[in-house]
Image: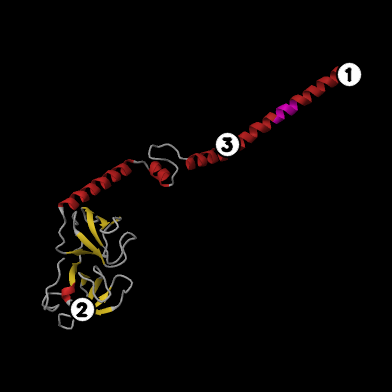
Amino acid sequence: MARLPEGLTAKQLGLKEGDKFRLVEDYDGYKIGTVVELYHDDDSSCPQFRVISGDKTGNLLGMYLKRCEPLRKPDEGHYYTIGEKVTIVSAFCSSLKPGETATITRNGPSPHFKNDVTGKTCFGHSKSIYLIDDAPISTEEHINNIGDTMADATTLLKEAALTTTDRVLRKHGLEDTTGAYTGAGQTLLIADLWSERREAIANKLTAAERKVAEDLEADKKAIAVDTAE
């Protein structure tokens, strides 16, 4: 972690009010990773911070700068690279909460992120994301991230090849990945067919009943003629 040096003021370090930081050690009930912002610079090495993550959001905290590492706001259009570390400073998505860190698993201005603790992912550029400077990544982790990226790319390509009909039916659980209808699809199919054909079926039955009635009436007339003769 890029812990700030001891004994220097915020101004000496080129920091200003509103800058974001992460705690690099547990302190006064706040855990490592808690995100704070410089709230009041009193020109000392122990300025006042405001907590912006966790259940104590909004609390003010007097603390030495050495307990923090700086977070850097990405430039507009920043091109994220695999292995880059970020932290979340405000609500972003259900997979990443303020104060949690994530690793970039897909390059680009709208990358994919993987939560470093839960492994859950989300994607897209957000003003809630800040970069963690000087956060090295191991070769093994880099290889794993590339594998995740390839898997994501394969999934995206497969989805892109689907027709609109495929996507809609599979989204609603009416068709499986082989194109065969599911149980729910079969039920809906039968219901739709019945809705479309019920009137025609009723008409056929009505016509058949009418034909039977007409034949019966004709037989009665024939019998009556024979009897009269």
Q: Could you tell me which residue is drawn at 19 percent across and 55 percent down?
A: 83
Mark 1 and mark 2: Cα distance apart in space: 121 Å
Q: Amino acid at mark 2?
A: Met
The circle on residue 141 is: none
Mark 2 and mark 3: Cα distance apart in space: 76 Å
Pointer 2: residues within 10 angstroms few (<14), some, or many (20+)?
Answer: some
- Viewer-proximal residue among 164 and 48: 48
77 left or right, relative to 162? left
Q: Could you tell me which residue is drawn at 68 percent across and 33 percent down?
A: 206
List the residue tagged with mark 2.
63
Locate residue 39, reporting x and y percent: 23, 78
The circle on residue 228 is: 1
Q: Amino acid at mark 1?
A: Ala
Mark 3 and mark 1: Cα distance apart in space: 47 Å
Quadrant in which the N terminus is drawn? bottom left
| Numbered disc in front, either 2 or 3 | 2
Q: Which residues are magenta?
A: 209-214
Q: Look at the numbered discs 1 and 2 and tell me whether their residues touch, using CB distance below 8 Å.
A: no
Mark 2 vs 3, N-terminal side: 2
Q: Look at the numbered discs 2 and 3 and tell me whether their residues touch, using CB distance below 8 Å.
A: no
**Vertical side of 8 occupied by 215: above or below:** above
Q: Does any portion of residue 45 appear in the rendered image?
A: yes
- Badge 1 marks a residue whose secondary structure is helix
List the residue tagged with mark 3.
197
Locate residue 93, reporting x and y percent: 32, 61
| Numbered disc in front, either 3 or 1 | 3
Locate residue 25, reporting x and y percent: 21, 70
- Badge 3 marks a residue whose secondary structure is helix
| Numbered disc in front, either 1 or 2 | 2
- Viewer-proximal residue among 223 and 169: 169
Quadrant in which the C terminus is drawn? top right
- Viewer-proximal residue among 198 and 117: 117
